[in-house]
C-alpha cells in the first residue's frame, strides 16, 4: 500500500471539500451497506417466520434441542463486545488511539469467545446427526435427540410415521425438523461468517490504532467497523430468542 | 454534522439496559407460558426494543443526521413489508398449504 502524501488527520482526500464532508460520505456509505445487511438477513428471518407458522410444534422442539445456556452466554459476550466497540469509537473521537486499541483487543477476544462456543455447539449437533447436509442428517437420531430435550410441559412428542402409518396420540409429524436445522445452520452460519469478517476488520483497526492514525477529525474507519459490529449484534439479538428460547 | 462524543456513562447505561432486557427475555420465555404465539410476540417485542436501543445509542442514530436515519428506516420498512405481506398470505389462504 502506498503511503499517503498528506496528513489524513488534518486534510481531506482531494475529491472532498473538507474532512466533514469526507466523514459524512463515508459514514453514509456504511449505513447503506447496513440497510442491505438488514434486508439480506431479513429474507432468512421471513423464511423462519413462515415455516414456524406452518410447523409451530416442530420449531419449538428444534429450539429446545439447542443449548440455551450457551446461547445466553454468547448473547452477553456480544453485548459486552458491542459496549467495548462503542467505547472504542468514543476514545478514538477524543484522540486516544491507545485506549481505543485496548478496547478493540477486548472486542476481538469477545468475538473469538463467541466463535469458540459456536464451534462446540456445532460439533455437538453434528455428532447427534442434526446437520442437514452432506448425508450427515440422521432422521431417527435427530427425532430422538429432539424428544429427549423437549420441555416437560410440551404435551407432544415428534415422530416419523412410515408411509401408510398414522400418528399416535400426542405425536406430531417431525419430518420438518430438518428444515429447522437448515435455517439454524444457515442463519447462525451466515452470522458467524460476519463475526469472522469482523475479527479481520478488528485486526486492521488494531494496526492503524497502534500507529496513531486516527484523530478527532478522522475516525471514520473505527466508526464504520463499529456500525458493522453493532448490526451483527442486532441480528444475534433476534436469533437468540427465535432459535434457542421459544 | 456535529461530532457528538458519547460519554462512557451513556455507553455503560446502554449496556446495562441491554443486559437487563436479555435477562427479561430468558425469564419470560422460560417461566411464563402465554400460549399460542404469545411467547413469540413477547420475545420479538423485547428484541425490537433491544435493537432500537443498539441503533439509537451504540450506532449513534439518536445523534445522527436525517439521511442516515432514513437509510436505516428504509431497510427496516422494506423488511416489514416483506414480513407483513408473507403473513397476509398465510392468514388469508383459503386452501391449505
Image (tube, grey):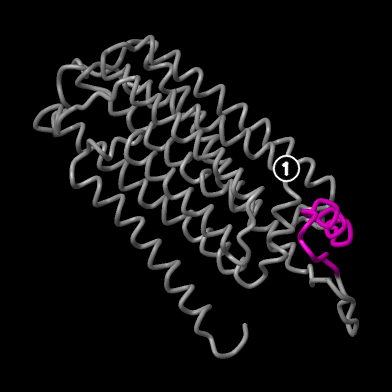
> What range is drawn magenta here?
A138-159
Q: Identify the residue under disc 1.
A: A67
Residue A170 percent across, percent down from the top left: 83, 71
Task: Establish if A77 lies above or below A212.
Answer: below
| Chain under disc 1 | A
Residue A189 percent across, percent down from the top left: 61, 46
Asked whether residue B15 is drawn in magenta, I would say: no
Asked whether residue A151 is drawn in magenta, I would say: yes
Residue A228 percent across, percent down from the top left: 41, 37
Work out whether residue A22 or residue A82 is closer to the camera in this orientation and state it: A82
Q: Is residue B35 left or right of residue A104?
A: right
- Residue most toward the bottom? B94
Identify the residue at horizontal 39%, vertical 63% (top origin).
Answer: B80
Identify the residue at horizontal 47%, vertical 57% (top origin).
Answer: A42
Q: Is residue A25 left or right of residue A60?
A: left
Q: Is residue B71 left or right of residue A33?
A: left
Amino acid at each position: 500500500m502506498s503511503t499517503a502524501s498528506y496528513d489524513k488527520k488534518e486534510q481531506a482526500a482531494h475529491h472532498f471539500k473538507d474532512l466533514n464532508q469526507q466523514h459524512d460520505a463515508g459514514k453514509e456509505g456504511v449505513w447503506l451497506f447496513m440497510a442491505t445487511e438488514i434486508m439480506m438477513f431479513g429474507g432468512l428471518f421471513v423464511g423462519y417466520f413462515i415455516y414456524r407458522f406452518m410447523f409451530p410444534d416442530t420449531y419449538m422442539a428444534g429450539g429446545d434441542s439447542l443449548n440455551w445456556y450457551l446461547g445466553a452466554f454468547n448473547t452477553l459476550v456480544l453485548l459486552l463486545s458491542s459496549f467495548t466497540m462503542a467505547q472504542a469509537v468514543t476514545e478514538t473521537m477524543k484522540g486516544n488511539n491507545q485506549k481505543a486499541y485496548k478496547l478493540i483487543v477486548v472486542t476481538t477476544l469477545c468475538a473469538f469467545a463467541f466463535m469458540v462456543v459456536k464451534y462446540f455447539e456445532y460439533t455437538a449437533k453434528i455428532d447427534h446427526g442434526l446437520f442437514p447436509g452432506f448425508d450427515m442428517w440422521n432422521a431417527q437420531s435427530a427425532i430422538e435427540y429432539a424428544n429427549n430435550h423437549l420441555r416437560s410441559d410440551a404435551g407432544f412428542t415428534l415422530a416419523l410415521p412410515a408411509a401408510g402409518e398414522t400418528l399416535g396420540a400426542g405425536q406430531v409429524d417431525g419430518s420438518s425438523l430438518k428444515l429447522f436445522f437448515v435455517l439454524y445452520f444457515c442463519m447462525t452460519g451466515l452470522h458467524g461468517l460476519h463475526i469472522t469478517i469482523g475479527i479481520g476488520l478488528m485486526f486492521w483497526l488494531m494496526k492503524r490504532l497502534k500507529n496513531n492514525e486516527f484523530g478527532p477529525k478522522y475516525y471514520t474507519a473505527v466508526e464504520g467497523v463499529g456500525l458493522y459490529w453493532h448490526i451483527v449484534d442486532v441480528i444475534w439479538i433476534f436469533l437468540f430468542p427465535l432459535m434457542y428460547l421459544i | 454534522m456535529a461530532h457528538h462524543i458519547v460519554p462512557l456513562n451513556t455507553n455503560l447505561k446502554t449496556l446495562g439496559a441491554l443486559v437487563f432486557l436479555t435477562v427479561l427475555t430468558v425469564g419470560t420465555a422460560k417461566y411464563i407460558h402465554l400460549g399460542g404465539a404469545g411467547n413469540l410476540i413477547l420475545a420479538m417485542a423485547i428484541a425490537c426494543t433491544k435493537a432500537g436501543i443498539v441503533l439509537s445509542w451504540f450506532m449513534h442514530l439518536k445523534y445522527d443526521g436525517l439521511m442516515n436515519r432514513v437509510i436505516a428506516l428504509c431497510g427496516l420498512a422494506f423488511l416489514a413489508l416483506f414480513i407483513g405481506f408473507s403473513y397476509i398470505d398465510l392468514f388469508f389462504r383459503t386452501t391449505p398449504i
